[in-house]
Amino acid sequence: MSVPARRLPSWVWVTGLTVGAVAAVTVLAVQADRGPHPTATATRPHASTSASPRPSASKPAAPAALPDDSGTGRRVVYSLGQKRVWLVDASDVSRRSFAVWPGTVSPDPGTYTISVRTQATTGSDGVQIEHIVYFAAKSGLSIAFSNAVDGSSPPAVAAGKQTSGIRTGKADGAALWTFGGTGTKVVVVS
């Protein structure tokens, strides 16, 4: 006389598969964290050839020099006076530099860290933005780098309105997003 095979309940199978999947994801996450971290690719910045507030890609210029007082190590450097950002790797080499459009409220010079990243939202000017990288606050406003989804420059700000977004070009925003993870140092210079 044979004994009938006993089937395992479906919840046992689901639990086993879930535990296995979580273990596999954990192992992959640990391996990814130990691997190389992405860095921005080197590009040449472009100078504006017109009176337009939008930087132009028509005439390449010499790379902008990294400010002397911008710290050391892997960091994002933002110059208030030059309205420019540099992505600097751990060996203190600038991997990318680009012009930006600052808001009406600027961070004070100093060292900050990227605290929050948001993939996409609507800016205070009503424009759809992406790659939002928050690093400071001032006058009750959060200060962040971002780019318009459609790649446009920011519209003119109404008189008396405060904005704290620092807009980048679309490709520059994607590079900053890749380079600037939570905890990345941001050095703001005059």
Image: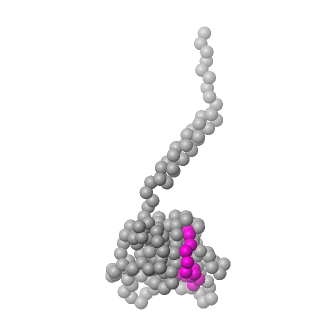
Residue toward you, 67 or 164: 67
Confirm whether residue 167 shows in the render: no
Q: Is residue 116 left or right of residue 63?
A: right
Residue 94 horizontal/vertical position (percent): 40, 72
Residue toward you, 104 or 108: 108
Q: Quadrant of residue 141?
A: bottom right
Give the colouring mode of the picture: one colour
Q: Which portion, as a residue range, is magenta?
A: 101-114
The chief SS type of the magenta part is: loop
Q: Is residue 16 above or below residue 158?
A: above
Q: Residue at x 47, y 64 (%)?
A: 178
Q: Residue at x 54, y 47 (%)?
A: 26
Residue 86 horizontal/vertical position (percent): 44, 74
Q: Residue at x 43, y 87 (%)?
A: 52
Confirm whether residue 140 shows in the render: yes
Q: Residue at x 42, y 82 (%)?
A: 55
Residue 4 horizontal/vertical position (percent): 61, 18
User: Which quadrant of the figure contains the N terminus?
Assistant: top right
